[in-house]
Image (cartoon, rainbow, N blue to C red):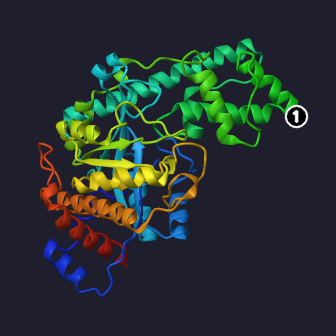
Amino acid sequence: MNDQSIFKSFPDRQTLLDYYKSKDEHKVLLVNGHFHTPFSFSAFTEIEQTFRMAKAEGIQVLGINDFYTTDGYAEFVELAQKYHIFPLFNIEFMSLQKDLQAEGIRVNDPANPGRTYFSGKGLTQPLVIGEDALALLEQVQTESNIQTAEMVEKLNAFLIELNAGFSFTFDDLKAKYAKNMLRERHIAKALRVAIDGKFDSAEGKKSFYKQLFSGKEVKSEFNDITGLENEIRGNLLKTGGRAFVPEDPKAFLSLEQVKDVIISAGGIPCYPVLLDDAKGNFTDYEKNKVSLYEVLVSKGIYSVELIPGRNTFPVLKDFVTYFRSKNFLITFGTEHNTPQLDPIKVSCSAGVELDADLEQIGFEGACILAAHQYLVAKGHEGYIDSTGNTKSAEYNSFAELGQAVISHFIGQK
């Protein structure tokens, strides 16, 4: 395990820049700045699988982005050094804006007004965080596990009613399918696997799913893992389902608290943009990009990230072009927070490739995060100061330094 930042041994800023400027070729590297690992829930069975795929697909910068935890950082660092792929250290939260919840305004969760997914980018590694912020982080971790433990209990009670002949324990599920955080998706996966093991015939499975779904027929094919697990979640673990457990308000921090935790951990607050869905719909919060920009700036947020696989190319291009014109830090990723094992390379919906401009913008964003991580590790101020003010006026100089940092890391032997 690394007990100090990998950047502390790097040369000073000017030496890095001189080395980088002396190189003949300065390429735009492919980046995936947001993916989840088994430390929250992931399509990957292990973190190294991500690096193997990234190497095969030509990705040279990766950003870990688990829910509520940085526990994967140590392994992530070791693998980044092994594969010579630059690491970005991120985290994700679910926060709640109660005023928007009361008004019925959907932010970046289309089903739950007020609920706001929010990321922290470029955190310290190993994590250095204030006591108050650490207490908040541990609070949401604990509350999340309490909720899933209660879901397991309710699910077991229902399985007894159905004479299923199998049940689960929280500890066994966590040991087998998760790390420190057991998520709703882990429960769905465990149940699907148990049903596959219990019934040999398709008819047996179909009959049991119908009982499990309170009379509703299963829609997915039995080899469609993602579809089955989504149906289990929708019918059992969501509102109205027999194993549904509402989240305690203590499981949600306010957006302001989440920002404070991120800044305390040395990171940059970043709003994850949902943008257009498969039907071309937008949430209330995001339907007007100018209004969204004004709201984010009013909250002291100058960074956004997107998962382009959700979005059509024209919508993504228009949105990113606008926010880049406002000097926002922009990153892209794939998330991989479902059972679906898609490629690591970022693309738009229907597999449409990013163009050269979008790849350039995504790389610049990753470079700024790299520079931020490097400077903070060296004891300097990064892209934001201790109060969260962003140095967007220095966008280009941070991007240049970040290219030098990434180049140095990738080239180390």
> Which residue is drawn at the image coordinates 22% and 58% (left, top)?
372
Name the residue furthest top: 161
Q: Image height check: is 288 above or below 374?
A: above
Q: Name the spot of residue 93 as percent of width and height, x first.
A: 36, 36
Q: Image height check: is 410 above or below 147?
A: below
> Which residue is drawn at the image coordinates 38% and 60% (left, top)?
77
**Of 69 and 239, which appears nearest the observer?**
239
The local secondary structure at tag 1 comes to loop
Image quadrant of residue 139? Answer: top left
> Which residue is drawn at the image coordinates 35% and 78% (left, top)?
411
Kind of residue at disc 1: Ser
Q: Characterize the local packing of mark 1: few (<14), some (14-19) or many (20 or more) Cα atoms within 10 angstroms.
A: few
Q: Image height check: is 190 above or below 310?
A: above
Q: Name the spot of residue 345 as percent of width and height, x first.
A: 50, 61
Question: Which residue matches tag 1?
Answer: 201
Can residue 70 be seen here? The reply is: yes
Q: Name the spot of residue 224 as percent of width and height, x first.
A: 71, 42
**Of 368 and 126, which appears nearest the observer?**
368
Q: Name the spot of residue 256 as percent of width and height, x first.
A: 22, 31
Image quadrant of residue 130? Answer: top left
Specify the quadrant that holds the N terminus: bottom left
> Which residue is drawn at the image coordinates 67% and 15% (left, top)?
158
Can residue 165 be seen here? The reply is: no
Specify the quadrant that holds the C terminus: bottom left
Q: Is residue 218 left or right of residue 316?
A: right
**Of 171 and 220, which appears nearest the observer?**
220
Image quadrant of residue 373? Answer: bottom left
